[in-house]
Amino acid sequence: MFHRIRRRAKGPSEEQRQFAEVFARMQNQVPQGLGAPRATPEHTEPVAVVDDFLPPELRVPSHDQLGGKMMPWTQPLVLDGEMVACAECGAYRNWLILSTRDLIWLRCRAGHQQQERRLDTAWYNRNSGPADATHATFEDCLRHLGH
């Protein structure tokens, strides 16, 4: 279909030959300073010890120190083409989505909670923003989020 004239290579090209020559010359060479002992500084001053860790009020607890995470979800939640509604009151928006122990729970404005098996921790992490606060109790977090 497509006709091409192909040159048959009789040997290495000029560039390949030049590269082979340079490579052969550099084969047994060692860069200057490599393998030589390092010069130690004559006078070393003691370095002041500085606590470079964040102060306690700026530290964020690790995942194993948290009981769970929570985020508001004001719009309707659609999973697999179906709008999720509260099993008890029928509410379909203004959810609190809770992530705890690799489970996802939905809490409606009326306080009813139901486990949502179609969501996982990876979904929660993709859709949640950075935490703006940490709370000692579940009720404190609910008050912070307006529930």
Image (cartoon, rainbow, N blue to C red):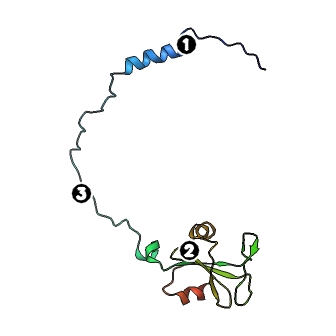
Marks 2 and 3: in contact by CB < 8 Å?
no
Q: Can residue 28 be seen in this view?
A: yes
Look at mark 3 in the image and give the residue it sits on: 46
Label 2 is placed on what type of residue?
Ala
Q: Reply above or below: 30 against 125.
A: above
Give whichever of discs 2 and 1 has the lower sequence position.
1
Give whichever of discs 1 and 3 has the lower sequence position.
1
Determine the residue positioned at 23% across, 50% down.
Answer: 44
Q: Reply above or below: 124 against 32.
A: below
Residue 141: percent from the left, percent from the top? Answer: 56, 85
Q: Point out the image quarter for the C terminus.
A: bottom right
Determine the residue positioned at 24% across, 39% down.
Answer: 39
Identity of the residue furthest to the right in this view: 1
Look at mark 2 in the image and give the residue it sits on: 131
Residue nearer the viewer, 2 or 124:
2
Nearer to us of marks 2 and 1 is: 1
Label 1 is placed on what type of residue?
Ser
Look at mark 1 in the image and give the residue it sits on: 13
Residue nearer the viewer, 127 or 104:
104
- Separation of disc 3 and disc 2 at Cα? 40 Å
Q: How crowded is mark 1: few (under 14 residues within 10 Å), some or many (20 or more)?
A: few
Badge 3 element: loop
- Determine which quarter of the picture holds residue 139: bottom right
- Determine which quarter of the picture holds residue 92: bottom right
